[in-house]
Amino acid sequence: MFSRIGAAAYKKDLTNIRILSEYLGDPDRKFKSIHIAGTNGKGSTSHMLAAILQTAGYKTGLYTSPHLKDFRERIRVNGAMIEKDFVVEFTSAVQPLIQTLDPSFFEITVAMAFDYFAKEQVEIAVIEVGLGGRLDSTNIILPELSVITNIGWDHMNMLGDTLEKIAFEKAGIIKQGVPVVIGETLPVTKSVFQEVATEKKSPIHFADQTRYVDESGMEKDELVVEVVNSLSNEKQVYHLDLPGIYQTRNLVTVLETVYQLREMGWHLPEKTVKTALRQVKKLTGLHGRWQIVHHHPLLVFDVAHNVDGMKQVTEQLEITDHKELHIVIGMVKDKEVEKILELLPKAARYYFTRAQIPRALPEDQLAKAGSALGLHGNHFPDVNDALRSAFANAGKEDLILVCGSVFLIGEIEWEEGGH
């Protein structure tokens, strides 16, 4: 399992998934889809699009990874998690093939998702890439539209050590004649996308060239964003239940994707888009994106775990009112630990910890790396112990942030509305 052991579990070709799919009767050809890749934002973008499509009345599949608490979070139809019985029956049915193929955990999960969406007869499925794009198991689909949110530094050990190489891997989801939306324009990667799109005869649309965010701010626990259409100068105001300021970038990508879907004949009225964006969490079960779970002290969970993600979180910290700052952090070994820690504020009190997976960086090593960069605090073998300590030390006007790893957030024993 990649999530537990890392690079050793990554299979660099599509042979297994093609065999699995054929064995199941090619379910990936039985539903329409939107394919979403990118270094950061692909999860939020996927959930926003799924919320919009299901609010518009389409039976919508959603495939994302990894999960926080329950494996079934990865595969949803209209927000509802895959049936437990289906997971059991599917696994039994492909057992003979598992013995001979030895597919990865991710390959089996992708095959399960496609089989479920086909059997549920979804009208459209939003499919999030697991890793990269070109060689990702999800890349056997022929989507209506491909979306690449952005390019940043993550998984360089598998995707390449330059932004161009990483962009090339993500551009692998661009299909012959299928339009592609690029969320953020970077001079260094723009030409990579244009070359692949030209070669594939795919219309290419850069979302940030057609719309921009004029203003954004917080109202209660909502993010309020004013978006301007660069061509018509028309303004629209959106309320998002995902309050992270970094969602402004994802929103621009989502709006361009919605526009392109409308051009293809999908019925997605503006009113529906606005309604859906106010309730993405409720409609699709998205958690861990600047998720405010408690006030006084303010407690926030965020799955940020790479350099670009952490930059966005530190920007958010700067605009969030608080007295003292407490940061509970745990990371996995294959991330750029020092580069990420360098971004964090020295004035905070730190609670270094770890997720209970082999890939986790031991908390004492993380504390040592933090201390060398001027980040001081204690270390704890379990995230819940770390969080209890932070709560014991925090005043009513303080902010407690838990971040650094999806797996860490997944292990927090927290019920909505209480400890």
Image (spheres, rainbow, N blue to C red):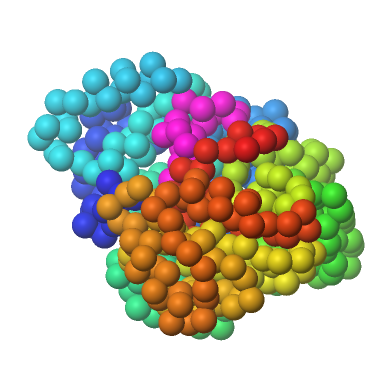
Q: Is residue 11 magenta?
A: no
Between residue 269 and residue 226, name the one nearer to us: 226
In the rendered view, tell whether residue 92 sits above or below residue 76: above
Relative side of 403 to 53, left or right: left
Q: Which residue is located at x 36 percent, y 39 percent?
A: 110
For the question of whether residue 248 can be seen, the reply is no
Location of residue 115 in the rendering, given as x and y in whole percent from the top left corner: 38, 28
Q: Quadrant of the C terminus?
A: top right
Task: State the image quarter where residue 41 is shown.
Answer: bottom right
Residue stretch rendered in magenta on the structure: 63-82
In the rendered view, tell whether residue 28 sits above or below residue 137: above
In the displayed orientation, state which residue is furthest to the right: 234
Location of residue 95 in the rendering, given as x and y in whole percent from the top left corner: 19, 26
Location of residue 225 in the rendering, given as x and y in whole percent from the top left corner: 82, 59
Between residue 356 and residue 110, name the one nearer to us: 356
Q: Which residue is located at x 77 percent, y 50 percent?
A: 296
Q: Which residue is located at x 60 percent, y 42 percent?
A: 286
